């Protein structure tokens, strides 16, 4: 008969999963940066004034 308790995840597996998630996040950040740079370059070529968006700026959605 099998064990009635669930098998626990090892710390090594948790570390691998965390490293993979961090790698995916860095990859997405690089991808977003490339998109933003391309958009800024395109706008600059068109002669428009571009102000880059600050992703950490959360003051727009605050309520008093």
Image (cartoon, helix red, strand yellow):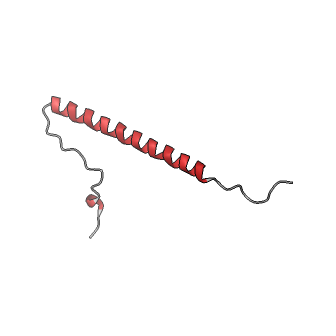
Location of the C terminus by quadrant is bottom left
For the point 75% across and 60% down, which residue is it? 5
Nearer to me, 30 or 35:
30
At which x and y percent is residue 44? Answer: 16, 33
Q: Position of residue 63 (x, y in %)?
A: 29, 67
Which residue shows up at 26% across the image and 32% down it?
A: 38
Of all residues, the one furthest to the right in this rendering is: 1
Q: Horizontally, is 18 left or right of 48 in the view?
A: right
- 16 or 24: which is nearer to us? 16
**Residue situated in front as seen by the camera: 21 or 39:** 21
How many numbered markers are drawn? 0
* Residue for point 26% across, 58% down: 60
Relative to 39, residue 21 above or below: below
Asked which quadrant contains residue 29, the reply is top left
Query: Which residue sits furthest bottom?
Result: 64
Dividing the picture into quadrants, the one containing residue 24 is: top left
Screen quadrant of the N terminus: bottom right
On the image, the x and y values in percent for residue 6 come to 72, 57
Query: Residue pushed farthest front?
Result: 12
Residue 19 point in image, percent of width and height: 49, 46
**Above or below: residue 9 compared with residue 36:** below
Q: Is residue 41 left or right of residue 25?
A: left
């Amino acid at each position: 008969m099998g064990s009635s308790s669930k098998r626990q995840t090892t710390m090594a597996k948790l570390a691998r999963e965390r490293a993979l998630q961090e790698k995916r996040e860095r990859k997405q950040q690089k991808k977003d940066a490339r998109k933003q740079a391309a958009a800024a370059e395109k706008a600059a070529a068109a002669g428009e004034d571009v102000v880059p968006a600050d992703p950490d700026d959360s003051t727009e959605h605050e309520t008093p």
